Amino acid sequence: MLQSLASNSCVRLIQSHKSTCYFVSLVLGYLLYLVFGAVVFSSVELPYEDQLRQELRAVKKQFLQENNCLTEERLEWFLKKALDASNYGVSILNNASANWNWDFTSAMFFASTVLSTTGYGHTAPLSDGGKAFCIIYSVIGIPFTLLFLTAVVQRIMVFSTRRPVMYIHTYWGLSKPLVAIVHATLLALLAMSCFFLIPAAIFSILEENWNFLESFYFCFISLSTIGLGDYVPGESVNQRFRELYKVGITVYLILGLIVMLVVLETFCELQQLKQLRKMFYLKKEKPQDRMVILENDHLSFTTVPETPAGLMEDKFQPFVRVTPLASPNDDPMIQ
């Protein structure tokens, strides 16, 4: 008997805190996914890093052997200066000296990466004034960008998602959840073709050192606003029409980010995903719950012992007794 009561109480406790259990499972799953990614990246990339380190040590040793007049300390100092400049996008190579990082088109490309929070990191402000302005510009510009993207996506969603789904549901008589799933899938395939596959093929042609996989990798890293910065277009030596190329990439990033948000918002409006999200949310207090609380309060008041009628009459009895009049003629004031 006690075991059955304990099991029933545990079941009721779990059901009453179902969303909390789901949320804890979500947090644990996310942590496990982070650990899984760390294990895979470490096992795949660590051998390549070790091989590159060995190659650099061999090249450095051979260079010092061929140049006896140069000490290892001087070489380290020179390499440090070159790497520091490279971190700011300035290369010491002669064939890369023609590319400026802060002309108008390059600065506009940098501003777009800052406002979209992509941040490739291939260029960074050198001066204190530039760093201070970057902070102020980002504090104002990032919320402004979010407002701009939200307004644009809201207007596009009306014509790209809501009206087509409602039209097919109304005039074709198909189920609205089914129409929404098919529409979201087609929209995702269209976005994949127009903003990932086709641009990847174009980048693989325009960039000499990029293959199709590297170009597709750049498109995904950019439009997902990850922005690792290992691949940046328009930075190769003697790039033809570099200014126009940079402007085109800026437009591509803005349009691609808008399309990605439209696709994500379309999937978020699916009824199945809404139900999935509700599993992890705290339940809001409904009007029915408030009515139950009020009813319980009312019941608690009604269970109070009633006061005897005699006491109630004595309680509300007036201090001065007035003799009732039989008729208006009995009143001496009237007479």
Image: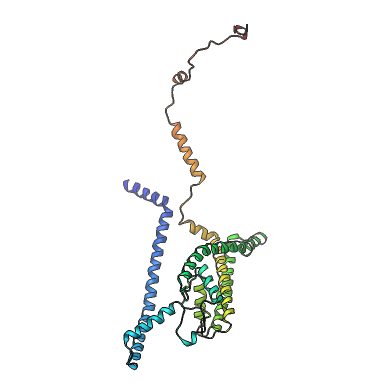
- Please determine whether, in this image, residue 183 is positioned above or below residue 297: below
Residue 39 in picture, x, y percent from top left = 37, 72
- Please determine whether, in this image, residue 36 is positioned above or below residue 14: below
Residue 188 in picture, x, y percent from top left = 56, 69
Position of residue 298 in the picture relative to residue 173 (left or right): left
Which quarter of the image is occupied by the C terminus?
top right
Residue drawn at x 56%, y 83% is 206
Extreme residue in the right direction: 171
Position of residue 305 in the picture relative to residue 239 (left or right): left
Extreme residue in the bottom direction: 66
Residue 98 in picture, x, y percent from top left = 52, 84
Query: Nearest the camera: 10 or 269?
Result: 269
Position of residue 122 in the picture relative to residue 9 (left or right): right
Query: Nearest the camera: 174 or 293?
Result: 293
- Please determine whether, in this image, residue 227 is positioned above or below residue 96: above
Q: Is residue 85 visible?
A: yes
Scheme by which the image is coloured: rainbow
Query: Nearest the camera: 322 or 60?
Result: 60
Query: Nearest the camera: 218 or 239?
Result: 239
- Please determine whether, in this image, residue 36 is positioned above or below residue 320: below
Residue 328 in picture, x, y percent from top left = 62, 9
Q: Answer with the quarter of the image where residue 296 lies.
A: top left
Residue drawn at x 35%, y 90% is 63
Which quarter of the image is occupied by the N terminus?
top left
How many callouts does the rendering have? 0
Residue drawn at x 41%, y 52% is 17
Residue drawn at x 46%, y 80% is 90
Q: Is residue 267 visible?
A: no
